[in-house]
Every structure is written in C-alpha cells, then in structure tokens.
Image (cartoon, grey):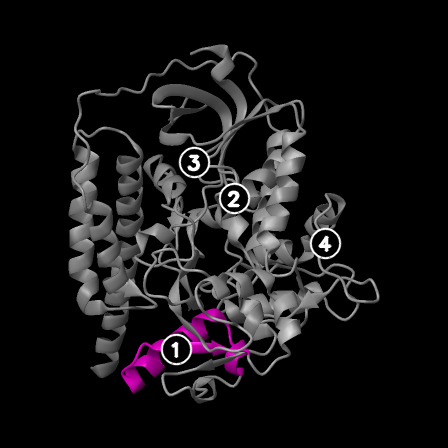
C-alpha cells in the first residue's frame, strides 16, 4: 500500500460531528476526511431549529436541561452521558461563537434563545431557521485552513475492515477503487432516513457506517429507537420531506386536523409543545379517529413580518411550493427524522472495537433515551466528537504502520437487481412507522432477512447501488429483529397478566 494512502486517522462523514472531530484532532496527525457526496450534503446542513445548551444563561441550568432531556427520552437516557452533554454544552457553544457562527441576538445584544417542544426554558441558540447550515459552513472554513487534513469528496466507502493495528478502507472515487488505511477511524456517517419511503434526511443517509461497524463486530444498540418528526411538509410527492421546524410550534403555531380543529388538548396537557414522539403518536391516533391523514400547522395568528423574519428559509421554501406561511394552513404529517440508537459508544465515543469511534447520529451515546429532545442533536455531535478527538490525541501511534491488504473486485460482476431498496422501504413503512404494526412486523423481518442474505452472499458489482442497498438491508434487519423481540416480550407480559 502506498505511503500516500496511510493516515493516522480517517474520518468518514463531513457533517457537524466529522468536522468537529477534525478541528479537535492534533495538527501533528495526518487526517483524511471522506465525504460520500459534496461536503454540503449532510443532515447537519439541514438542521433548522438550533443547538440547545446552557451558555451564560443565569435563569437556566444544566440540571434543568438534563431534566427536560430525561422527560423527553422517557427516562431511558444514560445519566453519565447526559451529564456530559448538558455540562459541556458551554464549551462547544463557546467554540462555535469563536469560529464566527452568527447566532441571532436580541435588541440589547444578548443571544436570542428560542423555545422548542419539550424544553422548559428558552435555551435554543439559532441562526434564523438555518442553524445547521450556518454551523457547517463555519466548521468547514476552519477545517479547510488545517494543512494536516485531506478532504476527499464524492467518494464512496465500499468496505471497511479491521486489520492488525488499524483499519483499511475500500474507496471508489472517479470510477477507480483504491485502498486506504489508518490507525484510528471515526465514523460520522449520519442517520438511516433512506430506509423509509419518506424522511427529512438527505439522500446519503443510508446507514452505511452502522452497517460497516456491525460487520466488524461492534455493538449496535437501540436501533429501533427511531424518531418520527410530527411536522414534515406533506406534499405527498417527494421522498425527501421538507421539515417544518420544531421552532414554529415553539413560537406559537397550532396543529389542526382535517376539520381544521385543534386536537392536541385531547392527548397531552403540553399541547403543541409536547415532545416529538407524543405529538407524532397523537397525530396517528387522531388520524384513526377522523379517518383522514390531512393535518395542518397554523401560525397565521402571528404577525406576518415576525414570521418572515424568524423563519425566512421555511417561508421561502413553502412559498415555492404554493403555501404562504403567514396566511395558509400548511399540510404536515409525521415522517422519519432521527435515530436515537446506533453504534454503541462510551463517554469518549469509542465503540466496542478498539480504535473505532462513532460520533453524531450514527452513534448511540445514550443521551437521547427513547426520544430525542429537540435541538440536542447538534450538541451531541459536537460534544462527543470533541471528546473522541481528545482521546485519540493521547493514544499511541505506530510510525511503521503499513498494512498489506487488497480488496477484491470482479469487473464482470452484474449490478444488483432493480427494486431492492424500494422493497426495503415499503416493508419498513408498513411494519415500523411511528408505532409498529405487529401483523406486518414478523413477515417484514423475514423478507428483509432474505434480502440481506441475497446481498451478502451474492457476487455483485460493488457500486453505489449495491453499497446502499446492503446498508439499508442490514439496518432494516437489525431494526426489525429488535422490534420483533420487543413485541414478543410485550405479548408474553400481556399473556402472563391475562393468566
């Protein structure tokens, strides 16, 4: 393997977690950052609401933030990891400010902190309604200044293997396969949205990192803990759904059913400001009650100029779709948004595979419990990637690391059959959307299991279609296997109570 392809650390993914890891790694280390698409194509870039955290906030405290995080997460949150999240928020928010992130301010010059569902305090730092984009742009600028970091965009990671002393990577770039190696690896590959028919995630969110980690023997935990955002724009046409931010409800928007009536009062005393899982479940219950999937978000009772200024991106995008946020009820419905589970990691984001780290949405730190509190995702990505980089900086590096490994490719291998990814999405949408459908869950698992076996055992051309289909099949298999086990345990409990 050529020396130019040997790195100290390889980061897979260039969202907030990957970029944060990069700027926190020692400049003495040789680092490669691999981007599946363009650097701008990531879920972090799509984040609208903001980043939650206590930073120079006299009326707020980390304990209050922790309490709200636990309530939203059904008290299944990991206490130690959540303590780290809320207490170290000030470090990473402060660093963003140092990097020039332009958080909105009040007329008196203080930072404007907004409110979102599940929060008891105004603690969301934001840049209008495009906070993720603002953060990613400033992190990218910082990374590009670092001479020790190479960036490879539009590069497909086809495979990844553990070798003595590190890892090897099979990368397809410009239709050419090449092997790279590093002593340490950080997976920041984002979510799994494309395993569903409708998602707010970007096109690259196919769970690749989770699949690679699973195949290397890493522990995967709570992959069935999937968050369905209650207010995705429902134009019933595109697979990638535009998100109507949590912050719109935070600023006083109402939810209305097919009769244009508010209904959250029938399900939760927190009304529209209940946590996301509660609101999504309420919409599904209301849909069954009314026999209609027509739901709307309504903020027309607020000042129109305030709405345009507070939500310029949402206002503009909806206007292009034919809806005026200041005058119209906007159609919404839940769709897949975020993954609380993932590659299980410790408090420094290290997985059960030595030297392999995972940060951001692909990881399971335990801070989210069974339902993420709004705007905790960017915070988690920054806090734990910084901690991962800090630990790697202190680890031993072998100056003679140069593994010999060749990934085999059959140039004559056929492409995978068409329709496999579509089939997986249809299975998941039916078997495990918002609330599991037990009747569809068990046969759905068997179908996905067979698709996974077909892809794992078959000899196919290793290209984007194959890699993403294999990842989706692996992710769907783990989700439904876990969901099936939970359903069986619940059925046993119900049966024992009946006896």
Task: Name the residue located 55 percent from the left edge and 17 percent from the top edge.
Answer: 398
SS for tag 2? loop
Q: Closer to the N terminus: mark 3 or mark 1?
A: 3
**Which is more foreground, mark 3 or mark 1?**
1
Q: Position of residue 21 (x, y in %)?
A: 59, 38
Q: Closer to the N terminus: mark 1 or mark 2?
A: 1
Q: Is residue 360 above or below residue 78?
A: above
State the separation of the CA atoms marked 3 and 2: 16 Å
SS for tag 3? loop
State the separation of the CA atoms marked 1 and 2: 35 Å
Q: Which residue is mark 2?
A: 359
**In-image side of 343 versus 141 (left or right):** left
Q: Position of residue 178 (x, y in %)?
A: 38, 19
**Which is more foreground, mark 3 or mark 2?**
3
Q: Which residue is mark 3?
A: 36
Residue 43 in sight here: yes
Q: Which residue is mark 1?
A: 295
**In-image side of 65 versus 100 (left or right):** left
Contact, mark 1 vs mark 4 (Cβ under 8 Å): no
Q: Is residue 476 above or below residue 179?
A: below
* Residue nearest the observer in this picture, 308 or 131: 308
State the separation of the CA atoms marked 4 and 3: 31 Å
Q: Residue 283 magenta-drawn?
A: yes
State the separation of the CA atoms marked 2 and 4: 19 Å
Q: Which residues are magenta?
A: 270-299
Q: Which residue is mark 4?
A: 90
Q: Closer to the N terminus: mark 2 or mark 4?
A: 4
State the separation of the CA atoms marked 1 and 4: 38 Å
């Amino acid at each position: 393997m050529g020396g130019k392809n040997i790195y100290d650390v390889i980061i897979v993914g260039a969202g907030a977690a990957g970029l944060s890891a990069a700027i926190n790694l020692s400049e003495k280390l040789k680092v490669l950052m691999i981007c599946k698409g363009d650097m701008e194509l990531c879920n972090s870039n799509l984040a609208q609401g903001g980043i939650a955290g206590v930073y120079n906030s006299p009326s707020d405290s980390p304990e209050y933030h922790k309490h709200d995080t636990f309530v939203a997460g059904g008290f299944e949150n990991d206490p130690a990891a959540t303590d780290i999240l809320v207490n170290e928020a000030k470090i990473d928010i402060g660093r963003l400010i140092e990097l020039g992130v332009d958080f909105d301010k009040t007329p008196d010059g203080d930072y404007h902190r907004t409110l979102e569902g599940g929060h008891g305090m105004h603690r969301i730092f934001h840049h209008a309604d495009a906070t993720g984009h603002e953060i990613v742009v400033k992190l990218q600028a910082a990374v590009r200044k670092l001479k020790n970091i190479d960036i490879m965009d539009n590069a497909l990671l086809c495979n990844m293997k553990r070798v003595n002393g590190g890892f090897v990577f099979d990368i397809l770039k410009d239709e050419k396969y090449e092997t790279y190696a590093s002593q340490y690896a950080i997976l920041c590959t984002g979510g799994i949205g494309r395993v569903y028919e409708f998602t707010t995630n970007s096109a690259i969110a196919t769970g690749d990192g989770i699949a690679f980690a699973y195949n290397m023997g890493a522990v995967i935990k709570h992959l069935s803990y999937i968050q369905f955002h209650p207010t995705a724009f429902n134009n019933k046409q595109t697979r990638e759904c535009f998100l109507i931010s949590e912050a719109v409800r935070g600023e006083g928007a109402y939810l209305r059913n097919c009769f244009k009536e508010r209904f959250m009062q029938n399900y939760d005393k927190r009304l529209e400001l209940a946590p996301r899982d509660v609101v999504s479940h309420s919409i599904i219950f209301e849909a069954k009650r009314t026999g209609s999937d027509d739901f709307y978000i309504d903020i027309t009772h607020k000042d129109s100029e305030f709405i345009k200024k507070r939500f310029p991106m949402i206002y503009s995008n909806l206007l292009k779709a034919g809806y005026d946020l200041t005058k119209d009820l906007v159609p919404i419905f839940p769709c897949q948004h975020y993954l609380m589970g993932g590659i299980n990691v410790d408090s420094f984001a290290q997985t059960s595979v030595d030297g392999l780290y995972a940060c951001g949405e692909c990881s399971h730190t335990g801070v989210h419990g069974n339902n993420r509190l709004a705007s905790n995702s960017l915070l988690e990505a920054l806090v734990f990637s910084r901690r991962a980089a800090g630990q790697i900086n202190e680890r031993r590096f072998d100056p003679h690391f140069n593994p010999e490994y060749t990934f085999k490719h059959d140039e004559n291998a056929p492409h995978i059959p068409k329709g496999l990814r579509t089939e997986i999405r249809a299975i998941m949408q039916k078997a495990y959307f918002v609330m599991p459908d037990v009747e569809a869950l068990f046969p759905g698992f068997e179908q996905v299991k067979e698709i996974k076996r077909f892809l794992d055992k078959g000899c196919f051309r290793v290209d984007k279609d194959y890699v993403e289909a294999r990842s989706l099949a692996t992710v769907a298999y783990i989700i439904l296997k876990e969901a099936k086990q939970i359903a069986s345990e619940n059925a046993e409990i119900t049966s024992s109570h009946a006896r």
